[in-house]
């Protein structure tokens, strides 16, 4: 829940709070109740004007107010409504952290961008797939006709068929990207998903996989199939970043209000200028990559109301962290 609320008496004493308000204001309910709301809304004139308008006109919508959160100051969008009359009246303050609002706006923009790209990818993939199938069929027929030809000619035909198969794989990935599935979220734990993936993932013989799971991990909202897809993509990227012997490690932890899943590799790291573009659709540094894996993974985590972030230094490996709200 992104909206918090506090309820005050007519003289501004806080009588009720919500868990979301406690999170935004970084203070437990017991320390908020009984306090004067003007101790939290530090710009008194702006807040007093909100209350005057609410007292005379009912409800005031979405005014920017500076509040004290712990030792920090935050800007929140606040609406105030008076309920009841006289000394029994109450003022209901509903507010949102503007940082959360910016995050939500960024996610909406990213989702719209991916949807637009997905539509174009679908159209292009369909246009390519039909002639590609025809070319593949004709090359196979040509191979049958050249059974008595030289080994060089047959090798050329096989090379063409191999490249056609690669193009078909790319087209299939574009089509899969354009049909991005909506997750079916339910309460569950990530431990079994991680254990199964670590056990079944086909890493090179020189790459070792380790897991370190927090004991008694909390339940989160998740789609197990899509979360497995994200983790598998991160493991695959990590394995490809390792040259020779190396280590892949999956860790879980609880930080603040998030369950954190970290996928670490001992690879060559990612330069800062590349990190800035990692989640852009079609951006890739791989010779045969499509640039859709991380963009899709990020969108899946967004659909879980979470975050996917990267921390990497050249020659020191990379850590991709998935943050899922509790």
Image (tube, helix red, strand yellow):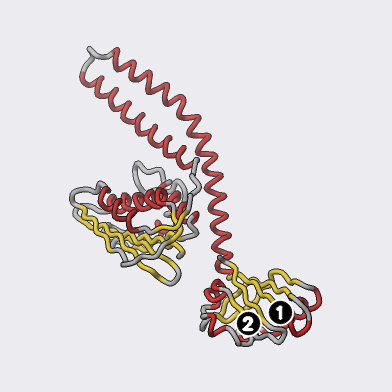
Image quarter where the N terminus lies is: bottom right
Q: Which residue is mark 2?
A: 15
In this rendering, the count of numbered labels is: 2
Q: Secondary structure at mark 1?
A: strand
When the figure is inspected, residue 247 is found, relative to residue 137, above or below; the finding is below
Residue 209, x across and y down, in percent = 24, 56
Residue drawn at point x = 45 percent, y = 24 percent: 131
Residue drawn at point x = 57 percent, y = 50 percent: 112
Callout 1: few (<14), some (14-19), or many (20+) C-alpha neighbours within 10 Å? many
Residue 190, x across and y down, in percent = 37, 58
Image quarter where the C terminus lies is: bottom left
Q: Are marks 2 and 1 in contact (CB under 8 Å)?
A: yes
When the figure is inspected, residue 82 is found, relative to residue 115, above or below; the finding is below
In the displayed structure image, the side of residue 31 where residue 145 appears, left or right = left
In the displayed structure image, the side of residue 227 where residue 205 appears, left or right = left
Residue 146, x across and y down, in percent = 27, 14
Residue drawn at point x = 75 percent, y = 71 percent: 59
Q: Which residue is mark 1?
A: 90
Q: Which residue is more in the foreground, 27 or 124? A: 27
Q: Which residue is more in the foreground, 85 or 224? A: 85
């Amino acid at each position: 829940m992104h909206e918090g609320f506090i309820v005050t008496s007519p003289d501004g004493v806080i009588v009720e709070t919500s868990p979301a308000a406690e999170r935004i204001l970084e203070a437990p309910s017991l320390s908020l109740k009984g306090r004067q709301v003007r101790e939290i809304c530090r710009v008194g004139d702006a807040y007093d004007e909100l209350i005057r308008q609410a007292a005379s006109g009912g409800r005031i919508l979405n005014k920017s107010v500076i509040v004290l959160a712990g030792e920090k100051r935050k800007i929140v969008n606040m609406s105030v409504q008076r309920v009841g009359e006289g000394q029994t009246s109450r003022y209901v303050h509903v507010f949102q952290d503007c940082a959360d609002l910016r995050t939500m706006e960024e996610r909406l923009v990213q989702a719209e961008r991916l949807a637009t790209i997905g539509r174009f990818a679908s159209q292009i993939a369909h246009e390519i797939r039909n002639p590609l199938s025809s070319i593949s069929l004709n090359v196979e027929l040509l191979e049958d006709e050249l059974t008595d030809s030289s080994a060089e000619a047959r090798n050329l035909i096989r090379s063409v068929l191999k490249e056609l198969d690669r193009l078909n794989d790319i087209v299939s990935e574009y089509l899969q990207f354009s049909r991005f599935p909506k997750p079916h979220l339910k309460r569950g734990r990530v431990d079994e998903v991680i254990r199964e993936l670590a056990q079944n993932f086909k890493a090179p013989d020189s790459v070792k996989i380790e897991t370190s799971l927090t004991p008694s991990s909390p339940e989160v909202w998740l789609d197990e199939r899509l979360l497995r897809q994200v983790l598998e993509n991160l493991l695959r990227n990590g394995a490809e970043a390792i040259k020779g012997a190396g280590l892949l490690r999956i860790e879980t932890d609880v930080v603040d209000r998030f369950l954190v899943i970290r996928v670490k590799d001992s690879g060559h790291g990612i330069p800062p200028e590349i990190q800035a573009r990692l989640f852009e659709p079609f951006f890739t540094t791989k010779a045969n990559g499509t640039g859709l894996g991380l963009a899709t993974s990020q969108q899946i985590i967004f659909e879980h109301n979470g975050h996917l972030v990267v921390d990497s230094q050249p020659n020191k490996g990379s850590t991709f962290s998935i943050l899922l709200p509790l």
